[in-house]
Amino acid sequence: MFEKRNVGQDQQLVGLTANRVRLEVESGKLLTAHFVAIDLDITEDE
C-alpha cells in the first residue's frame, strides 16, 4: 500500500514538473512577444 501511494506521488510530481516546464516555455514566448511589440512600437514612432 505504501508503494502505491509513493508511485502516485511520483506520478503527480512528474505531471506537475511537466506543467511547470510548459508554463515556463509559454511565459518565455509571451515575454519575447511583448518585447518585440515594444520594439515595433518604438521603431514606428521614429
Image: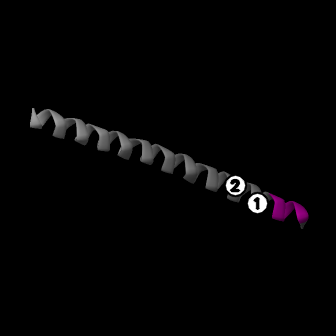
The foreground one among 30 and 11 is 30
Residue shown at the point (11%, 36%) measured from the top left = 44
Q: Are marks 1 and 2 in contact (CB under 8 Å)?
A: yes
Q: What SS does tag 2 mark?
A: helix
| Residue 13: mark in rendering | 2
Residue shown at the point (69%, 59%) measured from the top left = 12
Q: What SS does tag 1 mark?
A: helix
Can you give x and y, in whole percent of width and height, for residue 40 in the image?
18, 37
Left or right: where does residue 24 sit relative to residue 4? left
Can you give x and y, in whole percent of width and height, for residue 27 in the image?
43, 47
The relative height of residue 21 versus residue 2 in the rendered view (above or below) is above
Residue ID for mark 1: 9
Q: Residues within 10 Å of mark 2 (few under 14, many from 20)?
A: few
Query: Mostly what secondary structure, the magenta segment?
Result: helix
Residue type at tag 1: Gln
**Residue 4 included in the magenta stretch of the image:** yes
The relative height of residue 2 versus residue 14 in the rendered view (above or below) is below
Q: Which stretch appears magenta?
A: 2-6
Left or right: where does residue 32 sit relative to residue 5? left
The relative height of residue 39 versus residue 18 in the rendered view (above or below) is above
The foreground one among 34 and 6 is 34
**Quarter of the view holding residue 3:** bottom right
Residue type at tag 2: Leu
**Quarter of the view holding residue 4:** bottom right
The foreground one among 6 and 41 is 41
